[in-house]
Amino acid sequence: MHNTPERILVGSLQKFSVEDGPGIRTTIFMKGCPLNCKWCHNPELIDPQQQLIQSPGNCIGCGWCIEACEKGALAMKQEEGLVIDRTKCDVCLACAKGCYAKALRPVGKEMTIDEILRIAGQDKGFYDKTGGGITVSGGEILMHADFVNQLIEQAGRMGIHVCLDTSGFGDSQALMEMALRENVTHILYDMKSIDDKVHKAYTGVSNQRILDNLNMLAADAAVLDKLIMRMPLIRDVNDSDSIIKRTGALYREIGIKRVNLLPYHNLGIGKKRNVGGIEEEFQPPAENRLAEIERYFKEELELDVEILGNV
Amino acid sequence: MLTPRVSNMREKLFNTIPSITAERLVLATEAYQKFAGDAVPIFRARVVKHIMENMTTLILDDELIVGTVTNAYRGATLHPEFQSSSWYISDIDDFSTRDKDPYYISPEDKETILETLKYWEGKSMEDLAQTALPQHIRELEKDDIICVGLENGVSGETVCDHEKILTVGIRGYMEECQRNIDNALPQTMEEQAKVDFWKACIIQSEGLIAYAHRMADEAERMAAECTDEGRKQELLVIAQNCRVVPENPPQTFQQALQMVWFVHVSFYIEVCTTACGFGRFDQYMWPFYKKDVIDEKNLTREEALEMLECFYLKSCEVYEVRDNWYATAFAGYPMWQILVVGGQTRDGKDASNDLSLLCLEAADDLQTTQPVLALRVWEETPEKLIQFGCKMIQEGQANPGFFNDNAAIPICLGKGRGSTIEEARDWTIVGCIQPGPGGGGTDGSPDAGYVNMGKMIEFVLHNGIDPATGKLMGIETGEPRNFKNIEEFKDALKKQILHHYDLIRTGYNLMQSIHMNRFPVIFASMVTRGCVESGKSVQHGGAKYSTAGLYITGAANLADTIAAVEKCVFEDQDLTMDELIQACDTNFEGQERIRQMLLNKPEKFGNNLEHVDHIYMEMMHYIADHTQNWRDARGGYYSFGIDSQTMNIPHGLVTGALPDGRLAGEPFCDAASPMMGRDLNGPTATVKSVAAMRQESLHEGALFNLRFDPQGVQDKKGRDIIEGVIKTFFEDGGEHIQINVVDNETLKKAQKTPENYKGLMVRVAGYMAYFTELDKSAQDTIIYRTAHLSQG
């Protein structure tokens, strides 16, 4: 057993999440991800370290933070408003502590398992009536495998069902341990691209480990039933016929039954800018292409297909 | 699918602006002069009988259920006995042009109205109230600090004992009254008053029967002239119905509907009443529906649905003309005609039937603002019925409202004092969300008054002085700068609040006493259980149960203010009481940082945060525990509930900035909901907070509006989610919940005034953000998306 950290950085506990598994759920967004997908819609959750995030719309221009910053990283500019010099900022968060307007705040909050489940447990009545529960998401949950495993176990003792949301990039044994747990009812497993070149180019890592882990999970009949493949679809990146067909072939081979299609949306762009990143915009697949993909999975492969987050 | 008939009628409804006509005013004025001198109840009854004997008999195209309040379709009446002729005259040109709830008045009617109103100068209840009420209470009212009911209207909120009237007819009531008269030999003023009341009931019943027979004559006349054979037959059936009901018990489903409508329309002809409910419609109508549709198959289900829809459309034809202030406080011509379905029977079995569902279907078809559907839910309520309600919610209809038997039954046992469990199970809505025992028989007189919580806070911060006027308006609760802890602050608030509810009690008891002597409402009393038996009108406490409702505006602002003062002044000492008062007095000018601290640092009600939720509960229970043992003028009990209607807007308008960070003039929170923009943890957290207040102790219940993003509640899954939210709320003890699926308009407003919509969450698979924090372009995308969804 590794040393489980007592606390991890949590981006937020989002109650009433209704698209991250069945029923009413609380999604626990953990901070830190080994991938760096260019289209990531939660880019503030990639870096495992604490970060300062800006919400320019909230700024009241009081200038308090500029005084509070000993590193001289903050300045008020005529046109842009408050500007952070990220090269000077050491994320001491002195500025955020006094920013009541929440224009500057830490991305994550350090939380223990007890703290997480105290809040998530408040909605147990809603979970029980709708077949919901908690969804562990990120970031990448496998970066916090021991913590997540204990969280699941403790949730189980409270009678709370868990859904995992993972890229599959992480330790196989830890993943299998989570997947086999009785109160884990659903696993949302990302399929970003079956083509490794594309995968490497857009996520920064090879998909080998992800595919190996997928094969491993699918080989266990009990786990296979829990699997729902989640496919972000980005125009001209991973929506080509060859990628889709190769993916379909794999699904057929390993017995996948359910697929969620997630056409790209641009809602993460602002957040990327607000944590000091460089924005890059993509396009969702054309409408007819999305329909084709849906049809392919539904009709040719006879899978249960759901399109989510179609903005 | 609407039938062509219903579709025509509905279109006509939407295309007709309500109007005010002179007819009732003229007839009432004639009658007042003619009958003056009789004992008050008899005099009042003769006036109404005179109106019913002479008013226009109006039967409209396509109608299957007939009877109007005035001589015009969508016509409203003036009641100068209650409402002051002075504002009728001063507002008469405004009625047709005002933004809120306009009424058209023809030039001829206007002339007649102005001429007739001369007689009424200074004679109304409203004029009288102004001289009778102590000056201090009047000033508090003028400044929107409290308001006292009954000043310019009747207690209203009648729920007829439908079961009885459908069984015995008006004739049965008349015979009962006559027997009581025959058996009486008055020896005291009280005994004579009973005889006068029974006589009045008979006179007014004669008026209603005469009206119905005149309607029958009119239907026959029209039938004779009608060239369309189908319509001719319909008119003949209408004529026949009007000869049977309301005098005699109905024989058919259509006659039963006609009976209920005649009774209902009489309430509005007699007085300027409001919030008269249809009670447990699916219960008392069931025998007629069962006979005609199920057993004898005289009607198809579709034909019954069409009749029901015709009946619903009639309920869109009644109004209470309100002055400009009330038209803002109660905007949208609301009449609170609640139609209750579902729940349990008196012996604790599931009460729902096919008619319960048909009632929802009719509302779903029509999507009109009246009647308002109330779905009673308990453990045995069929899934099909709840799911249909959830489907309506999902489509953004915000109808039905859902009510919890497991909260309403204990409320009725508590407020009824002596109510049996059978009567409590037979509860119905009296007013808008207030449960009353005995399915017709409770007189709620719900509107005793409202207290403005924002002003209570201002009084505490200024030792009783209203900063808006500089005058000592409240009581002196001590120099706030000397308060040593939050308990002293809370105690001062409790004193101010209770003092003002006590002033309402004084004012309302006075108003009730005047009503007893001058304006006993005869017909509404007769059909309320207990009145004929006791020989007393509702105004005299004749109903089996009598309560008077006390309400509140700004409940969440009160809790948020206490939490903010506790955290920022006493615990963290971020600022002194003096600095806080200064900041509020200057509307946080130049002190936005302090305001942001007050807004964002302390806990806010509605986020499932234990401490502030507990403060909320403590304050609400304090008010309930102290006021609910008070007696009103007729021996009834006061009862407290959290319900602001849209009074949170005018009350907010006169209130300065508050320690919870709310700016001067902004509306308060809506009823029992959190303050706008402060429900940051999503709907489930809000539901838990609102349910946490132990609502069964609040005898008038708590009105809870909840908002959803349509994205989160689509398809079958969405319906299940809505149902899960409702059931969890009820399991936790909530009394009422109404769900609004957020619309495009709201999102556009959120773009313009983000602070009021901070909690508006954007939910897309795995993505999290607050709407107001998104880029303009992303907001536009979502607005597009939502518009798209709500059309679908």
Image (cartoon, coloured by chain):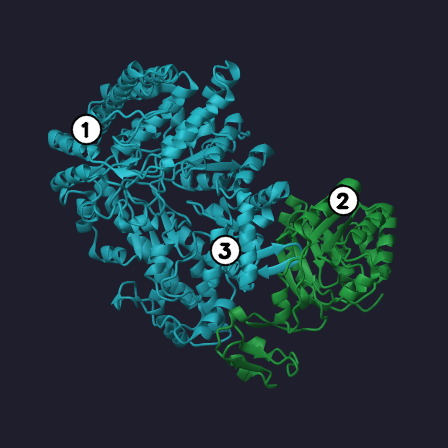
Residue depth check, mark 2 versus mark 1: number of the one nearer the observer: 2
User: At 22% across and 43% down in the image, what residue appears?
Assistant: B83
Please determine whether, in this image, residue B738 is positioned above or below residue A13: above
Is B252 left, or right, of A195 in this rendering? left
Q: Are marks 3 and 2 on the same chain?
A: no
Residue hosting label 1? B42
According to the colouring, which chain is green?
A
Label 2: few (<14), some (14–19) or many (≥20) C-alpha neighbours in 10 Å: some
Label 1 marks a residue whose chain is B
Helix, strand or loop at mark 3: helix
Q: How many marks?
A: 3
Q: Looking at this view, is A249 or B698 the one in front?
A: A249
| Residue kind at label 2, given as amino acid type | Tyr
Secondary structure, mark 2, is helix
Residue B270, given in percent of the width and then of the height, sits at: 25, 32
Q: Position of residue A57 (x, y in %)?
A: 52, 69
Kindly identify which chain the residue marked by label 2 belongs to.
A
Mark 1 residue element: helix
Q: At x 72% / y 49%, what residue is drawn?
A: A260
Q: Is there CB contact under 8 Å for labels 3 and 2?
A: no
**Contact (Cβ within 8 Å) of mark 3 with mark 1:** no
User: How far apart are the alpha carbons under marks 3 and 1?
Assistant: 56 Å
**Residue B193, relative to residue A86: is it above or below?**
above
From the rendered image, report the letter of the chain displayed in cyan. B
Q: Which residue is identified by label 2?
A: A296
Instruction: In the rendered structure, find residue B774 and report the number of the disc placed on it.
Output: none
Instruction: Report if the CB atoms under discs 2 and 1 are less than 8 Å apart.
Output: no
Q: How far apart are the alpha carbons under marks 3 and 2? A: 36 Å
List the residue tagged with mark 3: B747
